[in-house]
Amino acid sequence: MEMPALATEHAPTFAPASASEPAPSPAATRASAFRGIWIPLITPFRHGEVDRAALRRLVRHYRASGVHGLVAGGSTGEAAALDAREQLLVLDTILEEAAGLPVAMGLSGNHLRHAIARIRAFSERPLAGVLASAPAYVRPAQDGLRLWFETLADASRAPLVLYDIPYRTGATLETATLLALAAHPNIVAIKDCGGSLDKTIALIADGRLAVMAGEDLQALTTLSLGGAGAIIASAHVRPDIHVAMFEAAAAGRWAEARGIFHALAPLIRLLYAHPNPGPVKAVLAALHGCEDTPRAPMTAPDGELRAALAAAVAALPSAGK
């Protein structure tokens, strides 16, 4: 059964800059889309094929729940198990239901010419951004990583969002490299899974990139430091509560934000007790009737973890509280 959405207002609108202040740059304007709670959507399957009907239902649910954006084709969406046609099918299905909600598309791999070709296909769609990770497995030097991201940014019509996730790619983006990339006019944000608080602080203090937490348990920390938001898989479950946490933080109601975060933390830990997206899909199967089977080699969680997840979801505050 679908859980009711918590009625929440959008994050507070701050006073506009005075006439004496410089107008924001085009990059800053595009970066402003990357704020709040974004969901890296799962790809539901039915009998082994992309379940477009279930995907449409999920997009409508998350849109109504007040989330600020969606990501298609990320690791949570099992993009590595989708062929090029399926990836575009998923993206187009999400865009058809998004109704103006910003949508970004994930991009990974290590073949630069192939990545450029994918970006050009994505650029035919009305995307808020392309979420691009470092080239996996090959582990280039820092100048090679700059070349990779700058080439993708040059090729993309949509703004590029850096995805710093060294435990998946094997490539560590150093702070100096990220700050150099921030100078590119088409690189506007970062999904931060870099595992370095010092790097997070430096990027937020620099101010040119919208810093979006990518580690679910670091979301409130990033917001408290001045980060823009979070792109987190746990927001699939009770997105209303995640949005309420963001809005409380944006309004400076930190006791409320901390209370929400601590209520979510036990569930977040369980959602990563088995490789993502297995646990998320198991919960969504119970809440929304999606088939819960990931594509091989990813697997579903066992019965014990499913029972723990169900108990953790049941323990969350009810809608409106």
Image (spheres, rainbow, N blue to C red):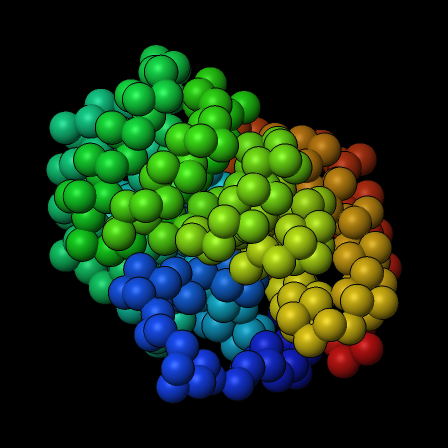
Q: Residue lying farthest front?
A: 20
Circle count: 0
Residue under the image location 31 percent in, 60 percent down: 27
Q: Is residue 46 at least partly visible in the picture?
A: no
Q: Where is residue 281 in the image (x, y as percent from the top left)?
A: 58, 46
Asked if residue 206 lies left or right of residue 245, the reply is left
Residue under the image location 33 percent in, 74 percent down: 23
Quarter where residue 24 is shown? bottom left
In this view, the residue in front, 149 or 207, is: 207
Please say if 142 is above or below 129.
above
Residue under the image location 58 percent in, 56 percent down: 227
Q: In which quarter of the image is the C terminus?
A: bottom right
Please say if 1 is above or below 194.
below
Q: Is residue 7 at least partly visible in the picture?
A: yes
Q: Quadrant of the N terminus?
A: bottom right
Quarter where residue 36 is shown? bottom right
Q: Position of residue 198 (x, y in %)?
A: 63, 35
Q: Where is residue 244 in the image (x, y as percent from the top left)?
A: 69, 71
In this view, the residue in front, 32 or 74, is: 32
Please say if 233 is above or below 304.
below
Residue under the image location 14 percent in, 57 percent down: 124
In this view, the residue in front, 208 or 19, is: 19
Asked if residue 83 lies left or right of residue 106, the reply is left
Q: Position of residue 5 (x, y in %)?
A: 64, 76
